[in-house]
Image (cartoon, helix red, strand yellow):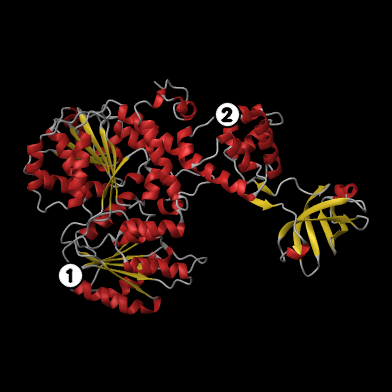
Amino acid sequence: MQDKVSNLSGIGPKKELALKALGIETIEDLLCYYPFRYEDMATKEVSELADGQKAVIQGVVATAPVVVRFGRAKNRLNFKLLAGHDVIQITFFGQAYLKDRVQPGSDVAVYGKYDTARQSMTGMKLFSNGGSQEDIAGVYRASKKIKAQMIKQLVKKAYEEYQDVVEEIVPESTRRKFRLLNRKKMIHDMHFPKTTQEFEIARRSAIFDEFFKYEARLALLKKLDRNDAGLLIKYDNSMLKRFISALPFELTNAQKRVVNEICRDMHRPLHMNRLLQGDVGSGKTVIAAIAMYAAVTAGFQAALMAPTEILAQQHAKKLSDLFQDFGVSVCLLTGTEASKTKVKHDILERLANKEIDILVGTHALIQDPVIFKKLGLVVTDEQHRFGVNQRKALREKGENPDVLAMTATPIPRTLAITTYGEMDVSVINELPKGRKPIRTSWVKQNQMNATLDFVERQLKDGSQAYVVSPLIEESEAVDLKNAQEVFEKLEKRYAPYYKVGLLHGRMKSDEKDEIMKDFKEGKYDILVSTTVVEVGVDVPNATVMVILDADRFGLAQLHQLRGRVGRGSKASYCILCADPKTDYGKERMQTMVETTDGFVISQKDLELRGPGEVLGSRQSGLPDFRIGDPVANFNTLQAAMEEARAIILDENFEYRAENAGLIRYLRAVVLAGANFD
């Protein structure tokens, strides 16, 4: 099944490339390239047909065929068909070669689109001798370089030649448990079903098969990761308890649960690969601090990598404050420090001599000269902002250190299963005590003046405000508020009493950091910004977030923006300015007003917009399932995941005969020929 498709006769280099562009490289790929829809090929009576319906009608050719040529190399074939008591005008465009098959008196069936008013049909396919041999026919996604009909022929050829080597991947006991078809029958009935019922049964099995193969690959990666010799971090429990009791607040129950999960992992000699999910402001940084302190008490160093300099600076300051009475050395390494030769040399020397316990920084941490003496724990913040290679490079700074990845993007369970299936997931689903919920309201554009008056009252109380716009400069194509124009209007309105700053993505990184720093230090009262403030810095004094054209943002993004306020002790507000034209748009605004729970919001976003949009396809690593839908078929996905994990993590996995096909599949796909033992 892992043979190249070029093994089939008739596939030369051009066809091979065209198939590769569709994701078809092996026989397995081709046989699992299922139709995206099915046409009803069962013969219908003319009286049953609706206008515009595609269907097969059967009858006797009543008139001699006439070919009319027009334009450049274009033609039209016309004849009349007697179908029961009805005479139907049939027209085929560009298929004059069918003329010899439609002589008067011959029995034919025509598949085409019916026109009620004209009592005519535009033909697409012609069948001789009583019609199609199948009640339904699959239609394949194709391209300009390879047609759907050619794919169908290749699938047929591949099935004929390879059906006897189609191997079971889903073990027999699992197939019995979920009443699934064997793989050979499933593939046959997905491509060549005789009835709709056959296709439906096959589809159910094919969805499970697709999810199971994916989850089995993740489960194997997880097993291999666990089997990797990890570090045994024997932390000092009494020192850890003393540090936690010295915190200026009590941990929530959710934080305590997550700390126990992480510490349990660190104390095992297995490699930890854990994702820490927590809503905006749920207290992830203090969890990371506890984990890093645990590593330090065991004689290890820790690293924390953040996506921006200003975020790294914020983390370094927070950690220094938390550890000031505990003798932990915290150091910051970003592009700024790395550019100063003397400073950088001093940091690298102290790090190599283990005089630095915790190094906080940006991607500067993964540069070649950075060498840790004894790295035990790697923490990445907003982990989806780093590529796989960047995270891997940081891990390689030590001897397989434990990994804790943090994200403030709440990910619904549906996506966590598919996207981070090889990681253990910890969730903080509770906000710290005393955090005041952010009051969210939705206003129309014509209420903008009242909104700005409200902002002014907050500024008079000594607070600061964000105003977020979806664009930087005016665009003729899209009539949206833009940051530059909003900045100029607000500067004019609030001068000379209040100072307005402007922040957008086209600015250089150090320029953005400078403006954000100035806003945090109170040099600006209002910050007009595009979404670059989405992941960011704590400004406890900012109490108002105004989002213009809010209906143009995804729900998860709106939630992230809202999380920029409410960081201090004052009551905070988020005002969504939008005039959505659709019920879908209004429903999204209503969701934001009704809940501040990021997991509820991300689930709603998933239902409304789909997985690629929620995570951002580019960064998500979300699998491109061909037949299963992780949202619509969530129960099947969960069942496939549980089965795959139970089978692969079973200590007798390799010795069970029914797993032979799965093992061969995993060896071919995951291990690429590596020794499975």
Question: Residue at point 24% right, 46% down?
Answer: 312
Residue under pointer 2:
1
- Would you call the spot at circle 1 few (<14 residues within 10 Å), some (14-19), or many (20 or more)? few
Question: Residue 67's x, y, as percent?
Answer: 90, 54
Q: Quadrant of residue 355?
A: top left
Question: Residue at point 12% right, 48% down?
Answer: 321
Q: Is residue 31 visible?
A: yes
Q: Nearer the viewer, residue 145 or 86?
A: 86
Question: Where residue 369 is drawn, which disc sits there?
Answer: none
Question: Residue 601's x, y, as percent?
Answer: 35, 60
Q: Amino acid at mark 1?
A: Gly
Q: Secondary structure at mark 2?
A: loop
Question: Residue at point 12% right, 53% down?
Answer: 250
Q: Is residue 54 above or below residue 587?
A: above
Question: Residue 84's x, y, as percent?
Answer: 84, 61
Q: Nearer the viewer, residue 336 or 272?
A: 272
Question: Where residue 462 is drawn, which disc sits there?
Answer: 1
Left or right of 443: which side holds 525?
A: left
Q: Is residue 538 above or below residue 155?
A: below
Q: Amino acid at mark 2?
A: Met
Whichever of labels 2 and 1 marks the residue nearer the N terminus, that label is 2
Q: How many marks?
A: 2
Q: Is residue 530 visible?
A: no
Left or right of 224: which side holds 670?
A: right
- Would you call the spot at circle 2 few (<14 residues within 10 Å), some (14-19), or many (20 or more)? some
Q: Is residue 676 above or below residue 69?
A: above
